[in-house]
Amino acid sequence: MRLLVIEDETALSEVIKAAFEDEKFEVDLAEDGQTGYLLGISGIYDAVVLDGMLPELDGYDVLRKWRQEQIHTPVLMLTARSELEDKLKGLGLGADDYLTKPFDMEELVARIWVITRRQGAVQLDHIEYEDLQLCLDSGMIRNTQNKQEVRLGKKEFQLLEFFMRHPGQTLCREQIAEKLWGYDCEAEYNNVEVYISFTRRKLRYIESGVMIKAVRGIGYRLEYGNG
């Protein structure tokens, strides 16, 4: 799971980052609305924590622009005031939840889990595509037909989860690199190919019919069968 935190209070954003990293999230930070907006349109995030009051571009304007551009990533708004008007404004623009500062960090974590489940970003304990099952807790993949299974490494898990949430969709190398290593990553594209190779081997090991197919000049796509 990858989380984007758009918050201009550095100390607070670092605390939020640490809390979610304890929950095994990958966390990216942005300190102003314009940077956060640009990160958000990448489509690599499973959820966003968005402060309402931001420099460069107001948090409400960020959310408005995302929803106008059909970016449906779950968003939890942070507001410094408790007025009903502010809460309704965020919800009216398409926020999935809100918290008023100061807040309890455990509650923030719990609410993020709730909105990601609500949006279908997280299943209870696994996701499936055709004969392939990915356990979100253990990192194991299983062939549901022959019961063969094997454990994935961290990057292999993140890679396959990304593909399984977008079956049949061509994902470009840039999207994959950003998902695995973050927006500011310096990972070479051959790193993507290396982990795709590792993951393919494990799919073959369990004799799954699911394949990661190269799309020439673009990226890769998750498919089933020999077509």
Image: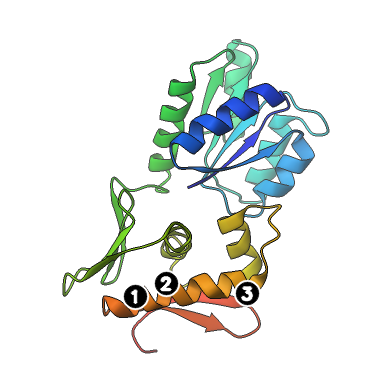
Residue with the mark numbered 1 = 203
**Could you say which is closer to the camera, residue 71 or residue 114?**
114
Please, which residue is most extreme toward the bottom here? 227
Task: Answer yes or no: is residue 133 visible.
Answer: yes
For discs 1 and 3, the disc positioned in front in the rendered view? 3
Q: Position of residue 196 (x, y in %)?
A: 49, 73
Distance, label 1 to label 3, CA atoms, is 20 Å
Residue with the mark numbered 3 = 190
Q: Relative to 19, does residue 83 appear above or below in the rendering?
A: above
Please, which residue is most extreme toward the right here? 56
Q: Residue at x 52, y 40 (%)?
A: 74
Question: What's the residue type where badge 2 is placed?
Answer: Thr
Label 2: few (<14), some (14–19) or many (≥20) C-alpha neighbours in 10 Å:
many
Give the secondary structure at mark 3: helix
Residue 28 numbered tag: none
Residue with the mark numbered 2 = 199
Marks 3,2: beta carbons within 8 A: no
Question: What's the residue type where badge 1 is placed?
Answer: Leu
Q: Position of residue 10 (x, y in %)?
A: 71, 26
Distance, label 3 to label 2, CA atoms, is 14 Å
Distance, label 1 to label 2, CA atoms, is 6 Å
